[in-house]
Image (cartoon, coloured by chain):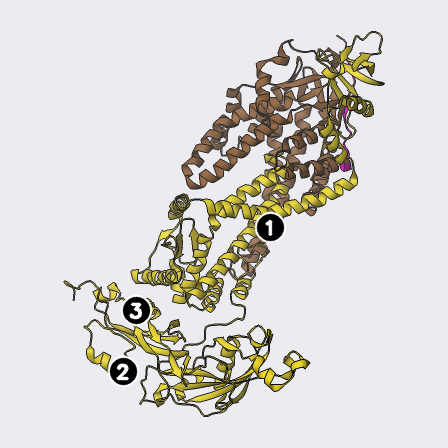
Chain colours: A yellow, B brown
């Protein structure tokens, strides 16, 4: 078989051209043109690959080149030689419109998949594999750079101690493999801010410490610990490197990175990644705060405060911002919009009892085969309260120091959440709003009928009381019963407010470590007291302690820290353990343990001694 | 000697659809092979653009060996990753890397030029690019200090010197490229585009000032700044292409191959219009229309270019019989560094 084609012959010596007719047969290539001497073995001839309709070049072993537009002839020639199979396949793909359409879809899909899925996963695994010592080294490097930009902290040592206390509180709830290191810096009085660097450095600005209360500081610290523990700093570096490589791979060469189109996807990736990190750190913080018994509502309030403190706030362009919009974050952290309730005055108390549970026939799945009353009652399991904190005593009533009650009715749905709470009876309208607000945040295990969750209607009575009318009782300790399981009896509904009586068992202190006396205060012989409100849960642990008021800010952190460690026997009513909301005075007194004071407090719930570890104050007044 | 009065156009046969198919298939293959195919993809894409360029009845050819480019890619990728990761931990490495890459820069420039030229063929003859390391260091690093000392005033002259460095390094056979130009036209191109950018920045600053004033002293939000940034980005984009078009005409009109000359008449308005459409298409398609834009730009620029031979170019001959196997070319081929300078 022979192939004949026309081409231009270049001799490789000059730019001169000869037109030649060539014939390929018997594995040899020969010139058919009279005065051109050319005969070579085809096996020694290199050819350029087929590409679109480009002319082909034949590179002869003697340095001469033939250019020909006759692609088909060259392909036929190569087919006989079993050469260029792979390139022929690529060419086959390149000339088909449908393949191009499919390739476009695949390209978009695989770029998206690798940017949003593969790169983050790889970066995450790589970041987690970095040894802590290297991570710490990276953090120290960044810290050294930052130190040149940020001014030293102007905070008082006691304020720094306040932040440290909150860190301790979090670490007690969740011990970490390494201890984070707090770094205090001033940011020009304008930027309440905190950020985490690799290696566990948490930089806190003076402005933030001034702005935030204790629980809010804990929330911010929890968020930053999240950034560190999830290694977002390292992941960010790895991701941007990998994204840069991806973009340059697709666009062909590194110089393309400098062009306008090349940088856009890169920037977008960075934005998306930052938002994702913030959300992950938020989720970590929520989890850690729950573990430390701190209401996530404080996280929401500090985010709002930070937003308000930021210059030019109000118009958040979420798609241009590295942080998600604050409102979105608050919604995600605190979906039911629960804000910390106002704080009760000392001596006030509140308690909640579940009186009755009933079911609507329409809510019970039909099961006609066993529709007897006996079957029904045997198969029903009532909802059990998982989280049912009594509401705070309403502010408006505090001056009048009245007692009162509110009876509310609500549905516990199939997920255990409270739906449609309504007040059926109340002794004063002021009690209604706090009762409803508290009820909305209660959590139950759903009622069950056989193996299915069913809706249940529960009636609860909330009692409010103020210590000032009951001087016979200890002013410091009030007990509110909270049933541990839903009662099916109806006897308490509408009952008059119950004064805490001899039938109730008050929480008893089991373990009450003393607060640390702040050194700066003892150095200056300053005494004071802090009123703390907290809840003793059914396990006897302290939850959600809050400062009601204090004589000195410096005493607040040690008081909270001490209260958090207290343990009680839970209060009881009618033989059931109940959660109790109480307020206590913690006295900081430099004189040594006044036995009289302790005796005077019949519940011995509070202590007023300075820490025994306090260094002697010799040489100072 | 016989003199010709002919003028030959550069003809570009590339087709947007054809190139899009090639681009998309090769890019996808690159991605699916985790970048290993990138070198082959690059050769095919570049060969399409060169092979579709015709002068005096014959096409240019691109004959680079993809395996060389692969070696270069691997080298660069490894160095880049090492820099990113190690530099994060030991910042001194970054300083060190800066010094090393500065020292390597002239070598990379010389190698890239040589590789690119060596693999470009016309009528069976390779182009060559030969420059000394010292000359490259002087041009690319030494003159930077002059720019710094003159507070940037030397920049247009530096651009001219870089072009001269690049152009005069090339030859085709025994015909050498020359560049006969003073710095003046470069200054005037940069001056006009600088004036436009400056005007836009001032206008943007005034608008921002008005916004701040109506904002009762608060700084403007990102949304209020957006028109300024868009205006600023567009001005930069246009000034870049304005400079490109003006210098394209000037540089080619002052380039000689021996006594053969070139003439370029790229319409500045047409070029800016073309680049505006390209920008819109690339941004609007998330980069997918990039190959479309490349073919359009290449065609528009090439068809404004003409070659005016002084005498028959068939006289251009190989410089020496040894050059096909000379050491320099082997070294140029050793690692296919190619940064598309």
Labels 3 and 1 share a subunit: no
Q: Is residue A296 left or right of residue A594?
A: right
Instruction: Evaluate if marks 3 and 1 touch, with contact meaning CB atoms under 8 Å apart.
Output: no
Which residue corresponds to mark 3?
A555
**Label tally:** 3
Subunit ID for the residue under disc 2: A
Disc 1 packing (10 Å; few <14; some 14–19; many ≥20): many
Q: Marks 2 and 1, Cα distance to the nearest angstrom?
A: 72 Å
Instruction: Evaluate if marks 2 and 1 touch, with contact meaning CB atoms under 8 Å apart.
Output: no
Q: Is residue B143 left or right of residue B19?
A: left
State the image coordinates of residue B255 (x, y, percent, origin top left): 66, 21
* Vertical arrangement, residue B330 with respect to residue A534, above or below: above
Which residue corresponds to mark 1?
B228
* Res A615 quadrant in image: bottom left
Tell which tag, 2 or 1, sits nearer the viewer. 2
Q: Marks 3 and 2, Cα distance to the nearest angstrom?
A: 24 Å
Magenta span of residues? B3-17
Labels 3 and 2 share a subunit: yes
């Amino acid at each position: 078989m022979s192939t004949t084609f026309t081409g231009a012959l270049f001799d490789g010596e000059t730019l001169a051209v000869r037109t030649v007719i060539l014939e390929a047969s018997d594995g040899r290539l020969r010139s058919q043109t009279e005065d051109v001497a050319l005969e070579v073995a085809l096996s020694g001839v290199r050819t350029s690959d087929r590409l679109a309709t480009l002319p082909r070049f034949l590179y002869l072993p003697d340095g001469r080149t033939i250019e020909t537009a006759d692609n088909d002839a060259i392909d036929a020639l190569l087919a006989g030689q079993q050469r260029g199979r792979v390139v022929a396949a690529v060419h086959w793909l390149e000339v088909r419109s449908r393949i191009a359409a499919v390739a476009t879809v695949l390209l978009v899909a695989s770029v998206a998949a690798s940017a949003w899925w593969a790169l983050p996963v790889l970066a995450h695994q790589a970041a987690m594999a970095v040894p802590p010592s290297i991570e710490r080294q990276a953090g120290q490097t960044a810290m050294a750079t930052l130190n040149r930009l940020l001014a030293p902290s102007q905070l008082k040592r006691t304020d720094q101690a306040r932040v440290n206390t909150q860190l301790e509180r979090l670490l007690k709830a969740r011990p970490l493999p390494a201890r984070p290191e707090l770094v205090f810096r001033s940011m020009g009085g304008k930027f309440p801010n905190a950020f985490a660097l690799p290696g566990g450095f948490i930089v806190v600005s003076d402005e933030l410490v001034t702005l935030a209360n204790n629980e809010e500081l804990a929330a911010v610290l929890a968020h930053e610990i999240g950034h560190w523990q999830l290694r977002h700093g390292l992941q960010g570096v790895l991701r941007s490197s990998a994204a840069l490589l991806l973009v340059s791979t697709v666009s062909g060469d590194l110089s393309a990175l400098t062009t306008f189109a090349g940088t856009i996807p890169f920037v977008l990736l960075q934005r998306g990644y930052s938002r994702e990190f913030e959300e992950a750190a938020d989720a970590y913080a929520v989890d850690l705060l729950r573990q430390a018994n701190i209401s996530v509502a404080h996280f929401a309030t500090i985010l709002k405060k930070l937003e308000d403190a930021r210059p030019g706030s109000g118009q958040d362009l979420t798609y241009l911002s590295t942080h998600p919009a604050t409102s979105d974050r608050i919604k995600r952290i605190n979906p039911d919009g629960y804000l910390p309730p106002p704080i009760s005055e000392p001596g006030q108390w509140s308690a909640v009892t579940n009186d009755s549970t009933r079911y609507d026939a329409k809510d019970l799945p039909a099961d006609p085969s066993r529709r007897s009353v006996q079957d029904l009652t045997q198969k029903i399991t009532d909802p059990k309260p998982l989280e049912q904190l009594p509401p705070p005593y309403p502010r408006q009533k505090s001056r009048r120091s009245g007692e009162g009650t509110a009876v509310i009715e609500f549905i516990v749905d199939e997920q255990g959440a409270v739906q449609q709470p309504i007040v059926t009876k109340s002794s004063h309208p002021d009690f209604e709003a706090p009762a409803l607000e508290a009820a909305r945040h209660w959590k139950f295990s759903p009622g069950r009928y056989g193996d299915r969750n069913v809706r249940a209607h529960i009636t609860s009575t909330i009692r409010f009381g103020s210590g000032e009318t009951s001087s016979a009782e200890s002013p410091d300790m009030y007990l509110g019963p909270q049933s541990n399981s839903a009662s099916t009896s109806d006897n308490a509904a509408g009952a008059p407010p119950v004064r805490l009586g001899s039938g109730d068992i008050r929480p008893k202190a089991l373990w009450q470590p003393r607060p640390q006396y702040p050194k700066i205060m003892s150095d200056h012989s300053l005494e004071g007291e802090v009123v703390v409100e907290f809840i003793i849960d059914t396990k006897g642990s302290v939850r959600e302690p809050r400062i009601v008021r204090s004589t000195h800010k410096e005493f607040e952190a040690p008081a909270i820290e001490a209260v958090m460690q207290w343990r009680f026997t839970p209060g009881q009513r009618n033989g059931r353990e109940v959660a109790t909301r109480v307020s206590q005075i913690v006295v900081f007194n430099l004189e040594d343990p006044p036995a009289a004071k302790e005796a005077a407090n019949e519940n011995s719930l509070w202590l007023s001694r300075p820490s025994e570890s306090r260094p002697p104050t010799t040489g100072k007044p | 000697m016989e003199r010709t009065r002919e003028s030959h156009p550069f003809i570009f046969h590339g087709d947007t659809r054809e190139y899009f198919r090639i681009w998309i298939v090769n890019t996808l293959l690159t991605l699916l092979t985790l970048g290993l195919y990138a070198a082959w993809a690059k050769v095919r894409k570049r060969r399409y653009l060169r092979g579709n360029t015709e002068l005096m009845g014959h096409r240019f050819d691109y004959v680079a060996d993809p395996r060389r480019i692969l070696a270069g890619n691997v080298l660069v990728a490894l160095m880049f990753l090492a820099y990113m990761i190690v530099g994060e931990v030991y910042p001194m490495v970054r300083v060190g890397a800066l010094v090393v890459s500065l020292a390597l820069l002239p070598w990379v420039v010389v190698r890239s030029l040589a590789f690119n030229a060596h693999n470009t063929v016309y009528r069976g003859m390779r182009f060559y690019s030969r420059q000394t390391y010292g000359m490259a260091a002087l041009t690319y690093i030494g003159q930077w200090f002059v720019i710094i000392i003159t507070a940037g005033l030397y920049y247009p002259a530096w651009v001219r010197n870089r072009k001269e460095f690049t152009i005069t390094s090339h030859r085709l056979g025994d015909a050498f490229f020359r560049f006969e130009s003073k710095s003046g036209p470069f200054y005037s191109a940069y001056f006009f585009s600088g004036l436009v950018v400056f005007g836009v920045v001032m206008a943007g600053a005034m608008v921002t000032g008005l916004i701040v004033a109506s904002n009762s002293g608060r700084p403007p939000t990102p949304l209020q700044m957006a028109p300024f940034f868009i205006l600023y980005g567009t001005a930069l984009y246009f000034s870049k292409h304005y400079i490109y078009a003006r210098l394209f005409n000037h540089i080619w009109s002052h380039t000689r191959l021996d006594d053969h000359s070139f003439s370029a008449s790229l319409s500045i308005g047409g070029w800016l219009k073309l680049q505006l459409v390209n920008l819109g298409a690339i941004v609007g398609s998330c980069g997918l229309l990039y190959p479309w834009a490349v073919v359009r730009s290449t065609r528009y620029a090439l068809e404004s270019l003409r070659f005016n031979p002084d005498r028959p170019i068939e006289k251009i001959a190989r410089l020496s019989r040894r050059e096909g196997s000379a050491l320099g070319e082997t070294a140029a081929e050793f690692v296919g560094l190619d940064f598309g300078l």
